Amino acid sequence: FSLDTGKISDVVETQFGYHIIKVLDKQDARQLGYEEVEADMTKFLIGQKRAVVLEEFVSGLKKNAKIEMY
């Protein structure tokens, strides 16, 4: 990000609307250790698995449903 600490940006347009950004602090980029990301990765992977299982369940319900239109 090219804005210096303490500076305020011009108006920025994104897909979510218009924004003005103020840089409060900058930190050097670094690679996170396993311990720092383990909980987030676990939540992410469980969420993915949950979505797959739900989709399979709903597909099974639709496949076996007997729906009559009147």
Image (cartoon, helix red, strand yellow):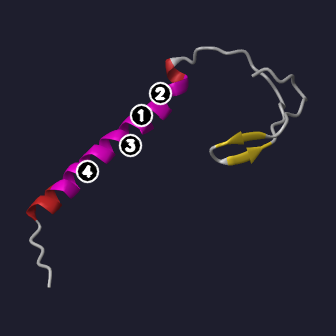
Q: Nearer the viewer, mark 2 or mark 4?
A: 4
Q: Is residue 58 above or below residue 68?
A: above
- Where does label 1 land, which residue? 42
- Where does label 2 land, which residue? 38
- Where does label 3 land, which residue? 47
Highlighted range, magenta: 36-59
Tell me which label, 3 or 2, sits earlier in the chain: 2
Confirm or deny contact between disc 1 and disc 2 (CB under 8 A).
yes
The amino acid type, in three-letter code, at marker 3 is: Gly
Q: Nearer the viewer, residue 29 or 3?
A: 3
The amino acid type, in three-letter code, at marker 1 is: Thr
- Where does label 4 land, which residue? 55
Q: Position of residue 49 (x, y in %)?
A: 30, 41
The amino acid type, in three-letter code, at marker 4 is: Glu
User: Residue 37 colored magenta?
Assistant: yes
Q: Secondary structure at mark 4?
A: helix
Q: CA distance from mark 3 to mark 2?
A: 14 Å
Confirm or deny contact between disc 1 and disc 3 (CB under 8 A).
no
Residue sitting at 62 percent across and 44 percent down? 15
Q: Secondary structure at mark 2?
A: helix
Q: Position of residue 50 (x, y in %)?
A: 32, 46
Q: CA distance from mark 3 to mark 4?
A: 12 Å
